[in-house]
Image (cartoon, grey):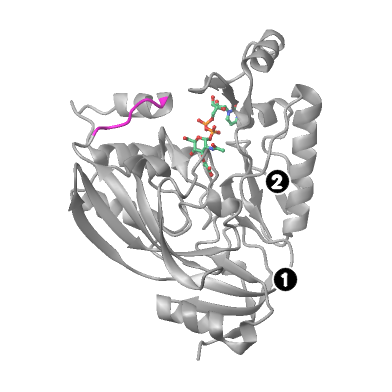
Amino acid sequence: MADFLEFYPLRRHNTFGFDVRARFAVHVRSEADLLAALADPRAQGLPLVVLGGGSNVVLTRDLDALVLLMEIPGYAVASADAAHLVTAGAGENWHALVSRTIADGLPGLENLALIPGTAGAAPIQNIGAYGVELRERFDSLRAFDRHSGEFVHLTLEQCQFAYRDSLFKREGRDRYIITAVTLRLPLPWQPVLGYAELARELAQDSAAHSTADRIRDAVIAIRSRKLPDPAQVGNAGSFFKNPVVGAEQRDALLVRYPDLVSHAQPDGSYKLAAGWLIDQCGFKGVSDGPVGVYGKQALVLVHHGGGTGQALLALAHRIADAVQARFGVRIEPEPVVL
Ligand code: EPU
C-alpha cells in the first residue's frame, strides 16, 4: 500500500513557500509507486495534484486532493542519428541534469541552466531562456494516461509546445502524469549566442571559443544577478508571460513609447517585454505586506513569508489591470494557479 501522508504541509514543496496543506500526499519514487497511489481506496474521488519542484505553481488554499510528489529518479544516455538522447526520470532536478549532461560531454542544455524545478515539469510550460526553449531539445516523454489507464509515449508533435505552453497546460492538464523525459541534444553541437545579454556576458570572457560550460556559467551569472534564489525569497521566476501583439499595435505603442522593448516573432507579430511594461507602471520593488514585486526584475513576484497565494494573486491582478489601462495589453500569469 502507498504511504499516504495526511494533512501534509506543502510549504517546502512550492518555491513561493506558501503554507498550505494537502489532504493526502505521497512520495512517488517509481512508476509502481504511482500505480499504487492511484489504486489506493483513499485516492478515489479526490482530485489529483502533481507536484515536481513546485517552482511554477501558486497554491492559494489547502488542497482537498491527493498530491503526488514526483521524485522518480533516472538518467540514461543513448545515441541516435545526429544527436545524443538523454532520458531523465521526472523527479530529477533540472539544473543538476543540465550540469550532469555538460560534465558527461553532452552539450545542448547550457542556455537552460539554473531554471528551478524538475525534468518532469520542464515540458509543461516548455521552459525557455536565453534563446533556447525545451522544445528545441526535446525528443519525447513517457506519461501515465489517466483516460486509458496505460503508460504512453508522447512525441514532440503530440506535446503541442508553444511559448510557455503545451498540451499539459490545456486538454492534457488532468490527463497525463509525466514519469520520464527524453531530450534530444543535436550533433554537432552549436552554441546559441543570439540573446544580447548572453553575448555581452560572454564577450567579457577572454577565451576564444564559447564552450558549453562557459555558456552555462554565463547564464548562471546573469540569472543570479536578476532573479531571486527561491531558497532565499519565495518566487516562481517570471510571473507573467511576455504578451504577443500584432505589428499594428506594436507600431502604435512605439509612437507613444519610443523605449518600448519588443522582439519580432517569425510570424510577424511582436513579443513585448512584460517586465518593461510593469516597470513603467511603477511596480518594480513595490511591496504589499508579505508579497511584492522583485526589485531587480519587475516580471518576478515575491513572497517574503507569512503571506498567502490569494494576496499574491490580488497583487498580480492589480499589476495586470495597470498594464492594461496604460498600454491596452493584457498580461497573463505564467504559473499554474491551484
Ligand atoms: N525589463 C525592464 N524592467 C524590468 C525587467 C525587464 O525594463 O524590471 C526589460 C529589460 O531591460 C529587457 C527586457 O525587459 O530589455 C527583457 O528582460 P529580460 O531579458 O530579463 O527577459 P524577460 O523577457 O523579462 C524572459 C523569460 C525568462 C528568461 C529570460 C531570458 C518569460 C516570461 N520570461 O524574461 O524566463 O529567463 O527571458 O531568456 O518569457 C521564467 O519563465 O520564469 C523566466 C525567468
What amino acid is found at the position of numbered circle 2 in the picture?
Gly
Circle 1 or circle 2, nearest the eye: 1
Q: In which quarter of the image is the C terminus?
A: bottom right
Q: What residue appears at the point 80 percent right and 35 percent down from the top-left corner?
A: 321
Mark sitting on residue 163: none
Q: Please give the residue where the numbered disc 2 appears in the rendered image.
A: 292
157 and 189: which is toward the camera: 157
Q: Which segment did they paint magenta?
A: 190-195
* Residue 192 percent across, percent down from the top left: 32, 31
What amino acid is found at the position of numbered circle 1 in the picture?
Asp
- Badges 1 and 2: C-beta atoms under 8 Å apart? no
Closer to the chain start, of discs 1 and 2, is: 1
Q: Please give the residue where the numbered disc 1 appears in the rendered image.
A: 62
* Residue 80 percent across, percent down from the top left: 20, 49
> Does 318 appear above or below 102?
above
Across the whole image, how many numbered discs are drawn on residues?
Answer: 2
For ligand 1, tell me if the residue under mark 1 lies within 8 Å: no
Dividing the picture into quadrants, the one containing residue 7 is bottom right
